[in-house]
Structure formats: structure tokens, C-alpha cells
Image (cartoon, rainbow, N blue to C red):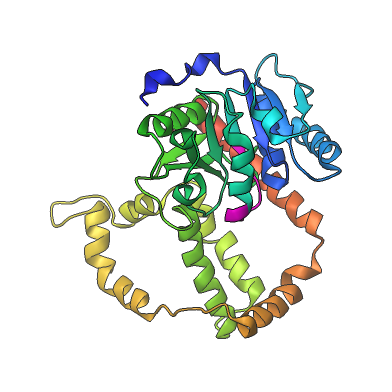
Amino acid sequence: MNIDDLPAQSTIKRIAVIGTGTIGASWAAYFLARGFEVRAWDPAPDAESTLRDFIHRAWPTLERLGSVEAGADSNRMRFCKSPGEAVAEADFVQESAPEDLDAKRRLYADIDASLPPSAVLASSTSGLSMSKIQAGFDAASRFVVGHPFNPPHLIPLVEVVGGEKTAPAAVDWTLDFYNAHGKKAIRLNHESPGHLVNRLQAALWREAMDAVLTGLAGVEDVDIAIKYGPGLRFGIMGPFELCHLAGGAPSGTGAGGFSGFIDHFGDGLQSWMDDLREVRLDPDVRSRLKTLVEESVGRRDFKDIAGERDALLMATMIAARTRREEGFER
């Protein structure tokens, strides 16, 4: 397969969303806002009404973010009786089924024969291997990972990686598709458990868990530390950019930027990394963490936490859009 075998980006009109839980519903709202027609399917008995309620609630936020294209209609969604029906006339498929390899392979078996010959299927899997998902299917060359971050209708990032049977052209096409429709899609050069960003997050989670398990700090203080410290910086710059800034400007007496950073802080950084400990999530550790987090975060209403997250995300996204409009983004 080469890129010429795949449809022109301008011809994409209909998206199939398979699985309409938290991630899939968010995807459906986003695709509708971008002007696509959506065909959706989910096995839950109340899935259609739940999905329509989510889209209704998400639409004003999408409008405030400027994500709603002219002519987009939140009602251009048809709920289908089977996954095969949903994908049969789709130009692109976003699969967001539960994170279970066997369940995904059963679903793909239902989809494989119905998928149009030029349609790409992207999986929202947060850590499964596409090579294991796609093995043995006729359409495997057009199966890719398109991993978003929750909630996809607000957060732009999507990780894209193929499996062993994925055609390179399908990966290229998927990157172009997401980036043409308001996403920030990144290419991963090979498969890895958890992809890229979840591995980065896992490193932080490990240290956060270790801190509360060893008594270095409490749950609330660990959360405050990230929210009001590095989290603010990581919201606007990546780790290598920040290290480059920390190294200072080049001068006549020595290296600046990242070279200055790694030379000046490298020994201390190495000593910190050497002191990082393994955290084993055995039953006892899980029980302790549940108790500690419940005593802190569990006191707050779940909807209030989610509402605060979405409001702050929206404010951040609006600020970022303004900066882009002023020409500050690369």
C-alpha cells in the first residue's frame, strides 16, 4: 500500500466511532464539531442516549474553543445496531473499545470484512500493541494506533504508531488527517508498552506514589506540588525546552542552553535518578494508596473535580489559541 491508495483528505466526510464510553463520546463530539457526519456504535443498552447527552453538554465548550467548523451540526450522528453497520460506509474509523486485547480482537473480527477498502481504522488504545491487535486480519495494513488524551474534544495531542502489519502510508495518512483537523499528532517510531506519554506519566506517578508511601509528603501536598510548580511549566513547554532554558543563554565563557544545563546539573541529576526506587503495585501497596488518596481527593465530589479540570483546560486552550493567532507558536 502507498499513500495514493488512501483517500484524499478533502474527501473525508463520514467518521465511524466504535465504542462511545468516556473517550469515544468525546471523539464523537469533536468529529461532529469539525463538520463530519458520525456513525456510532456501542453495546451498552443506554449508549445512544448517553452519547447524545454528552454531545449536547460538550457543544458549548467546543464553540468557545473555536473548534466548531462553519456548517457543523451536532445532530449529524446516527447510532448503529452493529459495529459492521457503523463502519460499512465510513471514510475513517476511531475505535475506543475497552482496554482488553481479546475484546478488541473480537470486535475487529466483526469489523474486518465490513471496513471499506480505503478506510483507515485508528485505535484509541492507551497501551496495547497494535501488532497483537491486528494479527491475522485482512485489513491489518490500515490499522493504526491513534491514542488521544482524556478528554479528546479538549486536549489536542494524539499519538500515532503502526503495528508490524501496518503500511507506513497508513501512519502518514493518519498523522495528516489528525493534524488537518485541529489535533497535535505525533509520530512514534516503534511500538512500546504504554506508547510514549503514558510512560512519561508513569515515571511521575511512580515518584508520586513513592513519596506518599514513604511519608516524604502527603497526597494533597504532592498534588499541590505538581499543580503549582512544574505542572504550570509543562503546560506550556516540553522537558527539553525547559532544560534548554535552564542552561541559560550562551556566553563567551562557556556553553549555554541544554549543553550548559547538562554540564552544570548532570551530576546532581544522575544522583537523583540513582535514588529512584521501584514501586510494586502489589495488593498491600494498592490498599495503602487507596486509603491515602480517598482520605484526600475522595472528600471532593467527582463531578466537581472533572468540572474544574475542564474549566482550566478550556482557559488554557483559549490562551494557547490566542498566542497562536499572535504568531508565537512554531
Location of residue 285 (image quadrant)? bottom right
Q: Is residue 111 left or right of residue 243?
A: right
Location of residue 315 (image quadrant)? top right
The residue sitting at 42% across, 44% down in the picture is 163
Judge whether residue 234 is colored magenta. no
Q: Where is residue 28 in the image (x, y as percent from the top left)?
A: 69, 33
Q: In this view, does 129 lie to the left or right of 124?
A: left
Q: Is residue 311 placed above or below 225 in the rendered structure?
A: above
Q: Nearer the viewer, residue 4 or 222?
A: 4
Tell me if residue 29 can be seen: no
The residue sitting at 57% across, 35% down in the picture is 112
Q: Is residue 189 left or right of residue 10?
A: left
The quarter of the image holding the C terminus is: top left
Location of residue 57 (image quadrant)? top right
The part of the chain drawn in magenta is 94-102
Judge whether residue 101 is colored magenta. yes
Q: Where is residue 138 in the image (x, y as percent from the top left)?
A: 49, 35
The residue sitting at 13% across, 52% down in the picture is 252
Q: Position of residue 71 (x, y in %)?
A: 70, 14
The quarter of the image holding the N terminus is: top left
Q: Which of 275 and 179 is in front in this view?
A: 179
Q: Is residue 290 placed above or below 182 in the rendered structure?
A: below
Q: Which of 235 and 1 is in front in this view?
A: 1
The residue sitting at 65% across, 46% down in the picture is 97
